[in-house]
Image (tube, helix red, strand yellow):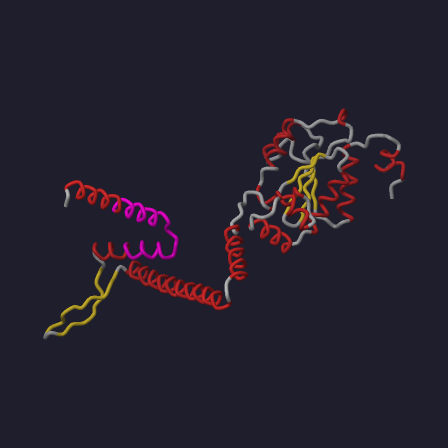
Amino acid sequence: MPRYEQTVAHLKASGAVPYEEQEQMALVKWLQAKRIKHIHVANERMASVQYKKKLKALGTYAGFPDMMIFLPHRILYIEMKRASKSQSRVSKEQKEWIEFLNMLDEGCAMVVLWRRRSDRLRARTNEVAKITEQAKKLIIADFHTGKFSQRELAKKHNVSKTMVANLTKGLSPKNDHLVEAQVSLLSAQAILSIEEMTAVMTAAKDEIYNKGLVINATQLNLARITQHLDKNTKFEKVGVGDGVQNFEPVELNASDYKALQYAIDKASLTLGVNPRNSTQINNTNAQQSSETKIVIERKELKGE
């Protein structure tokens, strides 16, 4: 066991600035006590020029952070620096790595410069380690309602704003329209009679049921179309003599392919997987309506 005079705590108490490696050793002891997986990236080792060239060829790069700490849903990349700014600096390579790692998706990277931030790092590590998958889902679910700011989400779920920002990075609220629909429904319940509300709910359930039938039938039809295309055959009546006809497999022809493609396009519109065609149809309808209007106006001018 080390003597107190040799510890980081003694150095700080006496006003001395611990060396970077002493700070890192203290961090490692704390991580070990918390049983948090971590690893030191040894980029600063003393070695011959020849061996350094070998390390570079093996994929060692200057400036990569000193520590990697593995937490649930997150990896922390820690660049150790002495507490005194005059006795430490961040190199160009380190800044480039920090910028790159902070751009990674899913909040899998966070870089902390150590200068007197041990308490902040420990609090951050505890926060990330404690957050469960269910808590993460709840935060994202609330975010998708479009009714919470990052600050409000952080307060509601008792996490930091940075945590919320990392969890919702690259996301956009997708359920805000459902919230508005629910508001409309609840508002209607307050003003409509029981009979009217029952009629509304029944009509909505019937529409959902009918849509389900259409979608199921369309999917079944698509599956059968795919079978025809895979086998490149269809069944047609073929005369076998004496006025007798049998169904025999024949190859698909050009008109068959055209008919099947048309059926696929219609199915894609029904299933909502091909909005491009829907837009084209709407544009065509609008064009036809415009042409009809022009014809009517011309007839009016001629007095017909």
Q: Nearer the viewer, residue 219 or 24?
A: 219
Measured from the top left, where is residue 298 in percent x and y? 18, 41
Q: Nearer the viewer, residue 95 or 164?
A: 164
Q: Residue at x 60, y 47 (%)?
A: 148
Q: Taking 24 as reference, is 90 above or below it? A: above
What's drawn in magenta, residue-wise? 262-288
Instruction: Work out which quarter of the rendered image holds the C terminus and state it.
Output: top left
Q: Is residue 266 magenta?
A: yes
Characterize the magenta stretch by its predominant secondary structure.
helix
Give the image quarter of residue 212. bottom left
Q: Is residue 44 magenta?
A: no
The residue under the point 88% across, 34% down is: 13
Q: Up-down: is 304 above or below 230?
A: above
**In the rendered view, does 7 fall on the left or right side of 189?**
right
Position in image of residue 49 (x %, y %): 66, 27
Which residue in the rendered view is the most extreme toward the left?
A: 242
* Res 67 quadrant in image: top right
